[in-house]
Amino acid sequence: MSLDSTDRRILSLLKEDSRMQYAEIGKKVNLSAPAVHARVKKMESNNIIRGYTIDINPIALEADLCAFIRIGKGKGTSAEVAKELVKIKQIEECHGVAGEDCLMVKLRTRSTAELSTLIDHIRGIEGIDRTLTVVVLESHFERGLTP
């Protein structure tokens, strides 16, 4: 599916507020609410819109320590290791990467003690040879993909 400028504008509006009514979106893109609804459904069926979610402030959950862990593996595939990593609720993201390491994860914990325990757990997963952890001191912005 090819996206036109109206589709991209609809995506931008939904990214700002996924609860925005189709009528309100329609006013901003000069379409009727049913026309906006049809475009959104088409983008959902073409896997352009993969879901709707909320943005939770990590501080509210007392999980304000953010870290990235580079993971080097030995035997097995990255997909096999990722199947184990997905079970760890503190991990927000897991990416296969090129370069010295095979995987990169982003996680959030409540404390350095919890981070240390989590690193030990990750190092114990079969197929993982090494880890390198980088702790985030401050985040200037996080925004995800912008249409």
Image (tube, rainbow, N blue to C red):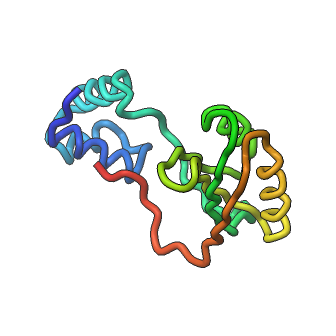
Depth check: give the residue in front, 75 or 135: 75
Left-right relation of 55 to 147: right
Residue 106, placed above or below residue 83: below
Residue 63, placed above or below residue 33: below
Residue 51, placed above or below residue 59: above
Provide residue 58's location: percent of width, then percent of height: 65, 62
Name the image quarter holding residue 141: bottom left
Numbered label tally: 0
Residue 124, placed above or below residue 137: above
Identified at 85% across, 59% down, the residue is 117
Q: Residue furthest bottom?
A: 137
Depth check: give the residue in front, 54 or 29: 54
Left-right relation of 18 to 136: left
Identified at 67% across, 50% down, the residue is 91
Provide residue 90's location: percent of width, then percent of height: 72, 52
Depth check: give the residue in front, 34 or 77: 77
Provide residue 1's location: percent of width, then percent of height: 23, 26
Identified at 15% across, 37% down, the residue is 4
Depth check: give the residue in front, 89 or 11: 89
Identified at 61% across, 72% down, the residue is 136
